[in-house]
Amino acid sequence: MLGHGPFNDEQYGYQTLIDNVSLLTPALLDKINQIVVSAGHDLVKKKAGEPLRGRCDSFAVETNVHFPTDINLLYDAMRKVVTLTAQLCDGHGFSDWRQHAYNVRHLKPA
């Protein structure tokens, strides 16, 4: 949302983020939504006046989804960071993360 890439060193203070998030009013979010929808219509390049038609299909499946508490979200994030770092190291020939599966298993106590 800040327009930075993954390797940007820019850091923002907590108060700066709070101040800027409070500027996202419903009117501004609606304006952003209109710009995004307009860009999507330009990308599809329909003829002028021709409606854009879409179709969606959905169904419900019973599943065991845990309530996203802070500790569960933190665990999910750390698990993914360890896994992706191991894949990146493996792709570049580093053996430093060879025990990543063990580390993931021990992130969360039983």
Image (cartoon, helix red, strand yellow):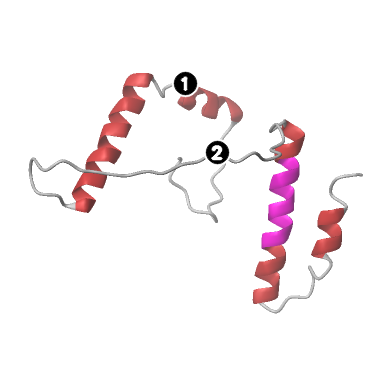
Task: Name the residue beneath numbered marker 1.
Answer: 22
Q: Secondary structure at mark 2?
A: loop
Give the crowd class for mark 1: few <14, some 14-19, many >=20 residues within 10 Å. Answer: few
> How far apart are the alpha carbons under marks 1 and 2?
35 Å
Task: Name the one closer to the observer, 95 or 19.
Answer: 95
- The amino acid marked with disc number 2 is Ala
Q: Residue at the spot x=7%, y=44% of the render?
A: 48
Query: Left or right of 108: which side holds 24?
Result: left
State whether residue 109 is above or below residue 94: above
Q: Secondary structure at mark 1?
A: loop
- The amino acid marked with disc number 1 is Ser
State which region is magenta. 74-84
Query: Left or right of 63: which side holds 40?
Result: left
Residue 47: image x %, image y %?
9, 49
Q: Nearer the viewer, mark 1 or mark 2?
A: 2
Q: Residue at the spot x=72%, y=36% of the render?
A: 66
Residue 61: image x %, image y %?
60, 41
Quadrant (top left/top right/bottom left/bottom right) for the C terminus: top right
Number of numbered discs visible in the structure rendering: 2
Q: Residue furthest left?
A: 48
Query: Left or right of 100: which side holds 68?
Result: left
Does the stretch in magenta take in 80?
Answer: yes
Task: Name the residue beneath numbered marker 2.
Answer: 60
State whether residue 10 is above or below residue 101: above
Give the crowd class for mark 2: few <14, some 14-19, many >=20 residues within 10 Å. Answer: few
